[in-house]
Image (spheres, rainbow, N blue to C red):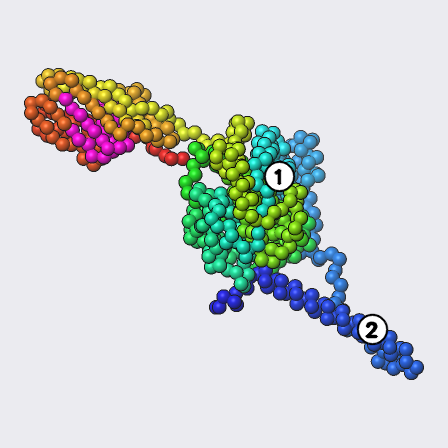
Amino acid sequence: MPKEAILSTTDVLNSANSLLTSHRELLTHVRNSQRAHRRQLHALATAPNELANLPLIDSPAPSPLHSPPSSPQLAPRTRPQRQDLQPAKRARVARYANYVPEEETIRNDYSQRYVDSGEWPQNRVLGAEPSRRFEEYPKQQRLLSLKKESVDAHATPPFFLPFSHLSSLHPQKFDVILLDPPFSSSFGWDDLQALPVPSLAADPSFVFMWVGSGAGEGLERGREVLAKWGYRRCEDVVWVKTNNTTNRGPGTDPPTTSLLTRTKQHCLMGIRGTVRRSTDSWFVHCNVDTDVIIWEGDTADPMRKPPEMYTLIENFCLGTRRLELFGRARSSLRRGWVTVLTASDGAKVGEHARTAEGDVVHLWNKDSWEEATRHLASLAGGKCVVPNSQEIDALRPKSPMRSGNSGMSGGVGVAISGGVGVGVGSAGVGMNAVNMNADPNMNIQHTRRPPSQNQMMVSPMMGMGMPMDMGMGIGNMMGMGMGNMGMMGMGNMGMGVGGPGMGMGMGNSRMGMGGMGGMGMHGQWGQGYDGFHWFDPSPCEYAVITAW
């Protein structure tokens, strides 16, 4: 099917509404003409009454005031008296039809309520408004208040430019890019993918892209576009729409081809580069908001997305370089953002336009933008981010800490030659120490200490240590083990884990190589028992190393 023949649901609805409007205007014009002609006929001396009394063109019947019930009215069920209940519970049973005394709850069947009244279940969610969301959590309210003050104090003036001037943003880089693609017969997924988003994105950076209700191919194509731009999908923000003010009764939802009534919109979130929540708190603050937004919508602009999305982005990403593509002149202009307006809204911004908060809007200018970003960077130690305060850092949710203690892997043990072995490496990896004793006759005896003794555990972030693990024996022979990198040491034994190991023994003129497969042991010498360092891996316990 050619691309021009593919119409979106919005285009079909707009075309139908335009046709109905034209039809209504035509009928109104015909009736007015009929009335005018009848008045002229009645003014004649010999009026043709038969012609003048003909009825006007038929008018549509008025809509009923109340929609008929969707199901027959059933007589209320009588509930038996429960004499075994307390008086208070008996009173609730008599008053509330859905009261369950054993559970102390009043069950609400929101699905049946939707069938009977057209009211969406999410209308009943308490505390959905941002102003009431954390009424019972004063610390969270305080955190959001502090972050709002900090973001407002470290924001650029609101800038805008028409979509036709998008190329003038090059070579600027942005920490966050928000998109609400205006899909239509003339703009599809291929056009969206061709946008210069990769050249506008900083590293690291985030992108937030609205992809529809999930009824079509939006979720799948959205992931493909993010991958083409060099982003990895990491989250999915959902807007759940309510119909408190738009409900017209049961069965009045817009027609859809999906199996279920669609009451949500998806916004895919992508990440570019490497950002770790545990170490990059200068750039991201995680878990401040949830991934669900409940909002009624804008009746004046049905395509408008929740304004809370701006706050969610600003609370999460501390970068001050924010860009919105396909914004709207009436609702998208915002302090701290550069808004690229749609083709139809590019000429709607006046010379002295202001945002909803009263900030003067400026036409995009490279020099003014760079001067504003340099000023913000000077307030944040040279980075274009919102500075973090001690109180915000104390109140914000932290990454969960994993069990285990970090430590160095240095250990002192007895070598076979009767000397002292010293192991120096990077983060030690949970290994039980092995006590090795040797006598001059090479009768090797070893004892295993309980796991609780001499264990070295790693922290969640693995540190870099000395790229050498050395064990030296003082006596008749000397052993030395070396590894290339990533050493792990074990108490009472010298061991290098990493690149190829090399062993060297002096004594009785014996020398050999060992430690293949990335593990250098102080043993496995070439010849004879005098040069053999015993190693038993059975008492070793390995801990899992994770980066998050």
Secondary structure beneath label 1: loop
Q: Earlier in the sequence, mark 1 or mark 2?
A: 2
Q: Residue 424: where, in percent of width, then height?
A: 26, 24
Q: Left of 530 or right of it: where is 150?
A: right
**From what the image shows, is residue 87 above or below residue 200?**
above
What mark, if any, has residue 130 been given in the picture? 1
Tell me where residue 105 sits by quadrant.
Answer: top right
Q: Main secondary structure of the magenta part?
A: loop
Q: Is residue 112 visible?
A: no
Residue behind mark 2: 35
Q: Which residues are magenta?
A: 478-503
Q: Which residue does the image show at 37% across and 28% down from the upper left?
A: 459
Q: Amino acid at mark 2?
A: Arg
**Does 402 sit left or right of 492 as displayed?**
right
Q: Secondary structure at mark 2?
A: helix
In the image, is 114 to the left or to the right of 60?
Answer: left
**Amino acid of disc 1:** Pro
- 136 and 106: which one is in front? 136
Q: Position of residue 353 (x, y in %)?
A: 66, 48
Task: Classify 10 Å Cα crowding around label 2: few (below 14), some (14-19), many (20 and above).
Answer: some
* Residue beneath the point at 49% across and 32% down: 381
On whether residue 499 falls in the magenta region, the answer is yes
Q: Does residue 324 show up?
A: yes
